[in-house]
Image: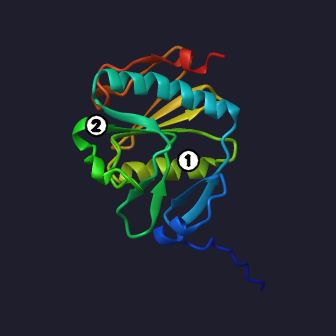
Amino acid sequence: MSATTTSHPRLMTIEEFEALPENGQKRELLWGELISVAPNFQHMALVSRLVEELGGYVRRGKLGLAGPEGTFVFPTERPLLLIPDIAFVRADRIPPKDERLGLIRVVPDLVIEVVSPSETSRTIHAKANAYLDQGVRLAVVVYPEREEIVIWSRDRTTRVLGFGDELSFGEVVPGFSLAVATLFEE
């Protein structure tokens, strides 16, 4: 009888992650496992539209801060350092200016991930669940190829939005609404 061995990736600490040389790639730690994401042009266009729409709405309403590429470190036993494509933090939860440098140690209220071609379904689901486990109120996953959006709530219920639907975030970002069709138009 032959034994099969499974290789497990080496797990990293936050400190080891921070010491990595910059290589231009978007890298995250998902429970200590280093993952790299390679966004494409479509990914960039969708993130840009969402930042413009959500960021503008949040800024005008002085609701908090919504922006791209924040590096969030979550207080867990296994290292969890994620960079959502877009994150929103309510105004009353934004740290003072002198605490805003370096890694972000505030749990965002909302995260949006636009799926890149390099990401697997397993990774996307693991990230959405990790966000929710850490206290994120809504985890939104945008699927460019399917032109579909899935909104995960803390209780793990999901809402699937298609071309004819409106994207909104309920009480997390009150009053915000965007036609899904607008997001995916050329």
Task: List the single residue furthest toward the right.
Answer: 2
Q: Residues within 10 Å of mark 2 (few under 14, many from 20)?
A: some
CA distance separating discs 1 and 2: 24 Å
How far across and how far down the image is residue 124, in percent? 55, 47
| Residue ID for mark 1 | 124
Tag on residue 57?
Answer: none
Which residue appears at 45% of the width and 61% of the height?
Answer: 80
Residue at x-position 40% and y-position 22%: 56
The amino acid at mark 2 is: Arg
| Picture coordinates of residue 66, whole percent (x, y) | 39, 34
Q: Quadrant of the N terminus?
A: bottom right
Q: Which residue is mark 2?
A: 90
In front of the other: 104 or 134: 104
| Colouring | rainbow
Q: Is residue 161 left or right of residue 93?
A: right
Q: Residue at x 61, y 25 (%)?
A: 147
Between 18 and 126, the residue placed more toward the observer is 18
- 89 or 161, which lies in front? 89
Looking at the image, is 172 positioned above or below residue 70?
Answer: above
31 w.r.t. 129: above or below:
below
Image quadrant in which you'd find residue 40: top right
> Residue at image x 39%, y 23%?
168
The amino acid type found where label 1 is placed reads Ile
Vertical relation: 105 (above or below) 161? below
**Helix, strand or loop for disc 1:** helix
- Earlier residue among tags 1 and 2: 2
Residue at far left of view? 92
Instruction: Tell me the element at label 2.
Output: strand
Q: Nearer the viewer, mark 1 or mark 2?
A: 2
Badge 1: few (under 14), some or many (20 or more) residues near its Cα, within 10 Å? some
Residue 115, horizontal then vertical, whole percent: 60, 39
Q: What quarter of the picture does the C terminus occupy? A: top right
